[in-house]
Image (cartoon, grey):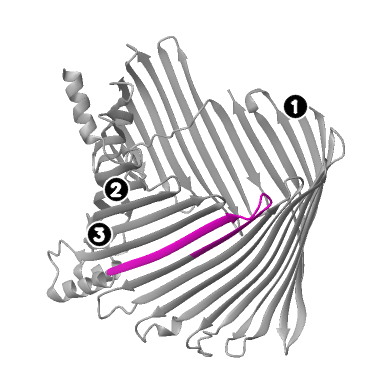
Amino acid sequence: MKVCLFEIILLALLMASSIRAQTGIGMQDTSFSGNYIETNLFNDINLANLQSIVNYTNSFGRYNLELSNFYLSNVSKLGQNFFSDFNTFRVIVDYSLSPKFRAGIGYQNMFYSDDKNVETNKNNSSYYFTDFDYDLSSSIFLNAKLGLKSEDQIGEFNSGFSGVLTAQSVNLLSDEYMTNGKIILFYEDLMQKKNHNYELGANVYKRFTSNTDNTGYVKVYNLRNDFYFPASQSIASLYNVKNNTEKRTENFVNLGDVLNYNFSENLLLSLGGFYTNKMVTKEFKYKPSPENILFENTYDTKMLEDKIELSGNLNYFLSGLNAQLKFLYSERTETHNLINTEGLSQIQIAQLEIAEKNKNNNSARTAVMLDMNYDLSNTNSFGISGLASLLKYDTNFDENYDDRDEIESLISAVHRYNNQRNFNLQTRFDIIISKLSYIYSQRSANNYKNRIYKLSSESTFYPFENLITRNIFQVLANYTVYDFEDIISQVQSFSYRQLYARDSTSFKINGSLSFDFLGELKFYEQGQFNNNEFTVKPVAYYEEFYLRPDIFYSINDYLNAGLGYKYFRQNRYQYQSAEKNLINVFETFGPLGEINFYFNNNSIVKLTGGFDFIKYSNPPQEDSAVQLNFNIIWNM
């Protein structure tokens, strides 16, 4: 009876999608699937990064072992190299006391560091915990982690209790209602800071009739996160501290419902509605003197957000016709307020309130989308899609002139051909039109209209069994026209036009030898655009060529290798007195190599590398670098 009552209580609570409220609250569960080792190394002339993942789970009788590690290192190669390192490690050993109950111990460590600052960019935390798992039923699972956490964040050391209780339901059935959800109760009490996250989330599904089903969503959380950041110079001298503390609290409620109704086998209607309310407060432990508080932007605030979203989706299927009509309306209000004003004069409060009111806004977006596709025959089909969207953004503050309307529209038509043997072709034409209009004259110089026209064609051709070629051809024109042009501030209408072609061909010479070729051409032009006369005055012009032949040889079923060569060239032109003049040539070229080792369980070791030779013509400059990629996926 007690277990049954507990299931009823959990069922009543588990009612929202299981999503963490904020990354970084507590020790994260770094989840990986399967037992494997993965390493990826990339190195070229500009940057290098190394990523390594280890995940291992196994059982030894009643003992269970979970071990995972994620490491990421980045190096940016500028005039001076800059690096950053991140690592998270976790190990859990538990003992199965019964088929439903497991108990054990665990350890998790996280660290981050880079070379920008000795202290402020180094963080390290360790968590020693006991771990308990209890399967209340085949659909309800409980986990508790209770232990001691120590952390060093930008030179501030803290330690204390940290624990989290998680209850999760997976496809829990009760009276024909199916529930998926999660409850998280996280609490952390360290020496100088406290964190918590109390979260409830689930979705409940119910099929009422053969034609009707409904899913309800709810998500609620309350979280607090205390974190350090470097103190300003005035706060450091006023309080004799190196770091300040910000306490961020957030209350969040999201309620939603989606109803699906089948009028017939060919007609389906979906209606959805969601409401979101969020309140965020930011409070600082140390505040600057009143005369510096506005300048340093360190004062306590509260933000309130309300959002409602309504949507409808109508799907129609008949013979070769597939049509979908969507409607979306959303409205959002954001209000910022000043809190905890003790010690401030009325003039200072008024100045801070103006700064916060300047952030207030409310917006409403209405969008309609149509997507239709019709099969003309077994080889030809035609599709058309469209989108119209209107955004109205208001600030409701006399000193904020950011009020504006944004209109976006998209029309697309596509034809698809497939001869059902060795050739398919898709031709597509897109028109994208957008308009930005500021309401007040103070910002109206930024009003503009943008039009994009794009015609593209993609094809795949198999002339015979061992040969395949894929081709892309695209023409694009982009025109931006300002309502008010200002020569002094260089606010002028402009155009961008592009021609792009790509060919990718693969030829299998025999069972062991194959040849690949990739070629790309790209020509694009930037210019000043006169909308009244629809003329363009070119400013800059670019030509780009890319060639890459490769040959691959399979030594056996477990090993293959390849050699290739790449060549890229960009010619840069500028127009002077209507004449096109070549101002610079950029080239990069060099050999490439690749070796692949294949093992059992789909494991692979891949090594690719090459030399990059780089040349500029103006001013004459040459450079070279080694490019190396190393990838391992080892499934255990």
**Which residue ends up furthest to the right in the rendered image?**
509
> Dot 3: few (<14), some (14–19), or many (≥20) neighbours within 10 Å?
some
Is label 2 in contact with label 3 (beta carbons under 8 Å)? no
Q: Which residue is mark 3?
A: 306
Q: For the point 48% across and 80% down, which residue is it?
A: 448
Front-lying residue, 426 or 595:
426
Q: Which mark is residue 321?
A: none
Q: Secondary structure at mark 3?
A: strand
Q: Is residue 155 visible?
A: yes
Residue 374 in percent (x, y) is at: 58, 56
Q: Quadrant of residue 296?
A: bottom left
* Marks 2 and 1, how far apart at CA: 52 Å
Label 2 – label 3 distance at C-alpha:
17 Å
Q: Is residue 363 magenta?
A: yes
Numbered disc in front, either 3 or 1: 3
Quarter of the figure that contains the N terminus: top left
Task: Give whichever of discs 2 and 1 has the lower sequence position.
Answer: 2
The percent coordinates of residue 30 (x first, y second) are 43, 35
In depth, the one of 204 and 307 nearer the eye is 204
Seen from the viewer's position, the closer of residues 31 and 478 is 478
Which residue is located at x 24 percent, y 68 percent? 293
Verify whether residue 276 appears in magenta: no
State the CA–CA distance, disc 3 to disc 1: 58 Å
Name the dominant secondary structure of the magenta segment.
Answer: strand
Q: Is residue 52 left or right of residue 457?
A: left
Q: Is 137 drawn above or below residue 269 in the view shown?
A: above
Q: Residue furthest top?
A: 61
Where does label 1 land, which residue? 558
Q: Amino acid at mark 3?
A: Asp
- Which residue in the structure is indicated by mark 2? 257
